[in-house]
Image (cartoon, rainbow, N blue to C red):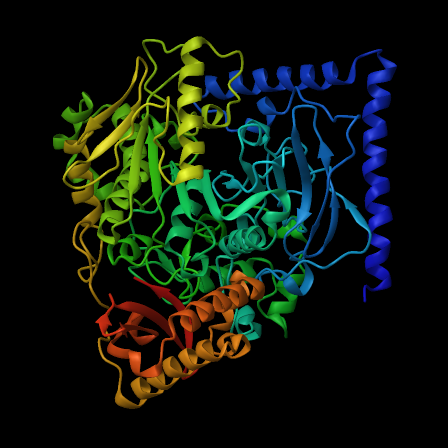
Amino acid sequence: MTTTHESRLEPTFDAQQQARINDKNRLADRFGLNKRWLRTSVLLVFALGASLLLASLGIATLAIFAVASSGPQQDQNVPPPRVAIDTGELEGLAMDNGVHVFKGIPYAAPPIGELRWRAPQLARKWVGVRKAIEYGSDSPQKNQWGANQDEDCLYLNVWAPADASRKPYPVMVWIHGGGFIQGSGRINGEAFAKQGVVLVSFNYRLGRLGFFAHPALDQQRPHDEPPANFWLQDQIAALSWVQRNIREFGGDPNRVTIFGVSAGGTSVNMLMASPFAKGLFQRAISQSGVGGFGPYRRWNIEHAGREPLTRIGEYYAKAQGVSDKPDVATALRALPWKTVSKIGSGVEDREAFDIVVDGFTLTDDPQKVFQNGNQNTVPFIAGFNSFEGNLSLVIPWTDQPPRAEVEKRLHRLAPLYDKQPADKRLWAELYGDVYFGASAQLLVREMERTHTPAWTYYFDYVRGRGRNAQGAGHGSEVPFVFGSVLLPSARDREIMDAMQGHWIQFAKAGDPNGSGLPKWPAYSSANPMTLVYGQDRIRAELAWLKPRFDLLFEAISATWPKDGPPSTVPATTNAIKNLNPAIENALRDRVSALFEALRAGNVEKCIELSDPAVVKSKGRDTAEKFFKSVSGLVKFAKVQSSDRTIKTITAIENGKAAKVEIELTLKGKKQPPGYEVWNLIDGQWFYRETTK
């Protein structure tokens, strides 16, 4: 039963929305302006002004919401669309271009009070119909042009085709950029929806709200919740919401593509590396994302000379004067969010916003995850732009990636960039290639060992390119992907149609190649092809910029500890290779118990034997559906206990998990082996996933 407090939420929510709409209408009426003209003109002036200002600084315009939201209006002749999801009924907007829009949908409970620095919890259910016509609050941040900000920020938005005759549609989930300290899901997905895609965008916790750890918080943490990377946990929660609900909007949960730029592209790489994200998406596109170098900071131990995140948290608690409080965790959670979200110049701020290996959401450095073949094996695209180095004006070069090792090779690198070693412009280009180019190339290359197709691109198109243009800046491809280029020329439109066409075709089929699109060969070691979106033409190039990246990979590899892998050599196992007999026998018993539960169709038992954190991250409904489908297959094939043999058990992740090789014999014929991964938690084995 819904509480009285919950039932009062909806009328207040509606009244506030209607008041804002009335204010906008009165403004238009006072000046005798058509409402569409007013909105379009204001946004156009703002977009042009912002673009010119940022262009003067050499920074690409990332505010695609400002250039993409004019034009279509609500269709007053069509009833507003309604959908019923797992938390209640929603009413959205029917646009006059055949698109249904739903905004401000809570995908998790507000991460406030005791839920600050906790794993995202399920959103509360509501009674009645919730209006989904305005964006939810953004995560607290700087410089977001007056957008509404609040710690209660976990909301998502959906743009869907109104035409239900061709359902289900592929789904694309956009992850915004902004260096993990700014940005939001306030975009316009109508261009995708008009082409038969359900597009989702969402907010996630930024800055210290998303990147924090402290020993006192860990003492109060439920054992099944990850201790850090709350931003990544939010993204996994949003993808779990998609799996549970996207059918109601006409989307296909079995064709979900994640894509993002900058911090969003980095997020895509981390989701590829996270065991918690397995099964939540089926394709991935990383635009200018980082993830191909390390080592990364650890959550609670010093590693490779980097302090743990918990120690950075202790510095922050001391700076805020709460380190001596009787209950430090409560004192930290009591700090106003406006205080927590401020970024200063102390060590607690300079080193606070690192992605960390926490042993849960990320079990190892992403590069090592890929090189060990443990990434999520879905079709993958990663690429970068020709002058990513313009970002160095905003985010300076740090000790990671390896500036010192690059500098040792400067005289060999400079000629490959047609520069002199002393040319300051050379460092900007090296910055971009090490941060983004090397990551994209390395991760795409490592997909081959999992026999999963991958593609890479190089964006080198600049509108109205002059002689002094160094190349396509960081994020400058985004308007071409979203079809939001202002006043496009014929050549602009050609690039826009190709990029958006490749992205949508990839979402539909898991391959970017399609009728009428430039051919894009997949990447392989024997045929390392890159698609170049060039100034004059779009073309596929063999071994693109290989001499540069051979040297850069050499520099990156030199930064690893001696026990870390070079960029081309996979590490096959971790330090602990064998389990003691008692632990191994306990695992064999649990593996057998799971199989017997599947044979009996006992889904509740399967859930009981599963890692609680994995079940929670994916959603219980998703886990139940998975086990029901596997149980059905086991029953259909009439698999008996005698048909299964545990061939090998190998310890992985320093003995915190194990990979179990299982061989089936059906009708006298041996089948290819399958593998189950089990986690060891508090001395007990729990099922995590099935893999190749």
Q: Please determine whether, in this image, residue 223 is positioned above or below residue 374.
A: below
27 left or right, relative to 262: right
507 left or right, relative to 438: right
Q: Residue drawn at (32%, 33%), measured in percent from left and top?
A: 432
Q: Residue drawn at (53%, 19%), measured in percent from left and top?
A: 51
Q: Position of residue 673 (x, y in %)?
A: 25, 68
Q: Please determine whether, in this image, residue 300 is positioned above or below residue 291.
A: below
Is residue 149 among the parts visible in the rendering? Answer: no
Q: Position of residue 684 (x, y in %)?
A: 42, 83
Q: Position of residue 555 (x, y in %)?
A: 19, 43
Q: Residue drawn at (55%, 77%), measured in percent from left and top?
A: 604
Task: Write down the quadrant of residue 457 in the picture.
Answer: top left
Is residue 645 among the parts visible in the rendering? Answer: yes
Q: Residue furthest left?
A: 412
Q: Position of residue 548 (x, y in %)?
A: 18, 32
Query: Between residues 666 and 417, which one lies in front from this camera angle?
Result: 666
Task: Write down the quadrant of residue 530 in the picture.
Answer: top left
Quadrant that contains the N terminus: bottom right
Quadrant that contains the C terminus: bottom left
Q: Please determine whether, in this image, residue 2 is positioned above or below residue 336.
A: below
